[in-house]
Amino acid sequence: MTKIKESSTNQANRNNALTRCPVTYTIDKIGGRWKPIIIYNLLDGTKRYSELKRMIPAITEKMLIQHLKQLESDKLVERKALPLIPPYVEYSLTESGKELRTVLDAMVGWATKNRKITKISVKQELEKPVLCV
């Protein structure tokens, strides 16, 4: 990983936005393609790594591990390793992570409503060609 220059103006602006804006703070913690999906799948209880991988087949192992570590360091996910052979690791949401249910439910509600307004269904969205640069 590259080292972040702590004294840069960009870093100062980022830290300022994170401390002053609650929306920016929240997006920093749960934003991206995979974090909300991981959290959503943990809302109904503890899961093993392999269960999460099966529930989110499009995610690579590297990304799943990376995001689980980030969520754990942000105190949204708890990792519990049991001393068994083979290794047994469980992931669950912390109390702070469980509080995100209302945020994710609001996002689902907004997406459902917005798709109706723009007349885009989930199926239509998936059928669009992917443009690569």
Image (cartoon, helix red, strand yellow):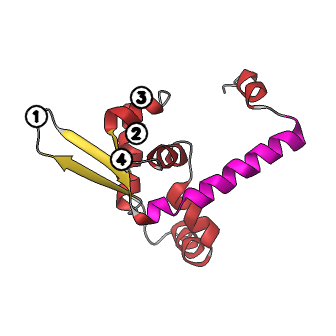
Residue 118 placement (x, y as % from top left): 88, 40
For the point 61% across and 53% down, which residue is it? 104
How far apart marks 2 and 1 lie (CA) works out to 22 Å
Contact (CB < 8 A) between labels 4 and 1? no
For the point 43% across and 69% down, which residue is it? 6
| Amino acid type of the residue that numbered disc 3 sits on in the rendered structure | Arg
Determine which residue is flagged by label 4.
46
How far apart marks 4 and 2 lie (CA) works out to 16 Å
Residue 92 placement (x, y as % from top left): 36, 51
In the rendered structure, the answer to whether residue 16 lies left or right of residue 115 reads left
Foreground mark, 4 or 3, reads 4
Determine which residue is flagged by label 3.
54
Q: Which mark is residue 64?
A: 2
How far apart marks 2 and 3 lie (CA) works out to 11 Å
Residue 11 placement (x, y as % from top left): 51, 68
Span highlighted in magenta in the image: 96-119
Determine which residue is flagged by label 1.
85
Work out whether 81 lies above or below 119: below
Q: Residues within 10 Å of mark 4 (few under 14, many from 20)?
A: some
How far apart marks 3 and 1 lie (CA) works out to 21 Å
Which of the 4 quarters of the picture holds residue 25?
bottom right
Q: Farthest bottom residue? A: 20
Contact (CB < 8 A) between labels 4 and 3? no
How far apart marks 4 and 3 lie (CA) works out to 14 Å
* Mark toward the start of the polypeptide (4 vs 2): 4
